[in-house]
Every structure is written in structure tokens, then in C-alpha cells.
Image: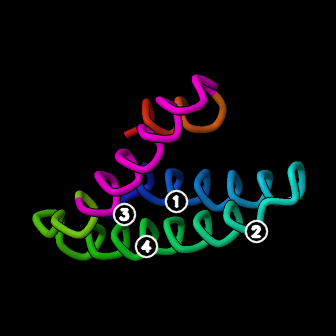
Amino acid sequence: MTDYLGYTYSALILVGGAIGYFKAGSAASIVSGTVFGLAAAAASYQVSNNPKNVIFALVVSVLLLISMGIRFNKTGKFMPAGLITLLR
């Protein structure tokens, strides 16, 4: 069974990193968006092949939750940290 939700989540992360780069010139956004987006896509691939193999997906989501939660707490801005925190 294909993990469409996971692939959509990874695409949103990749697009968010690209938007952060093009809108604000943030190299950190493109790097972290690419790393987390590709990691989420790899996790979705694993879950698609074995639905019980969710550990890597969980680790990626928790790391992103923590990093975006800290960012949201510091800035108080909903976009993009608050949105990503709510997605997973």
C-alpha cells in the first residue's frame, strides 16, 4: 500500500524549504527542507513497502516537530513553523 499522505507531507516540506529560500534568501531553509523532505520521502517509501516499519518516519516527524516547535516558540509566527508543527 502506497503511503500517499507521507509522500504529500515530504513534498510540502521540500516546497516549504524552497519557498523559504526564494522568499527570504535563507540557505538554511533550502538545506533543512531538502534534508527533512528527502528523509520523509525515504520514510514514506519504507512505510509503503512495510506498513509496520514506521520507526524512521516517526523519528523524522519528531525531529521536525521539535525543530519547528522551537522556532515557533522563538518567533511566534505561525508560518511556517506553526503549520509544520500542526501537520504531524
Is 61 placed left or right of 16 in the picture?
A: left
The reply to whether discs 4 and 3 touch (Cβ–Cβ < 8 Å) is no
* Residue that mark 4 sits on: 39
Per the image, label 2 sits on a secondary structure element best described as: helix
Give the magenta range: 59-78
Residue 26 or residue 57, whichever sits in front: 26
Instruction: Residue at 49% x, 66% y: name it.
Output: 36
The reply to whether discs 1 and 4 touch (Cβ–Cβ < 8 Å) is yes
**Spatial distance from mark 1 to mark 2, Cα to Cα?**
19 Å
> Residue 18 at what x, y percent from top left?
77, 60
> Residue 39 at what x, y percent from top left?
43, 73
Amino acid beneath label 3: Thr
Q: Find residue 70 and name its label.
A: none
* Residue that mark 3 sits on: 2
Which class describes the residues within 10 Å of circle 2: few (<14), some (14-19), or many (20+)?
some
* Residue that mark 1 sits on: 10
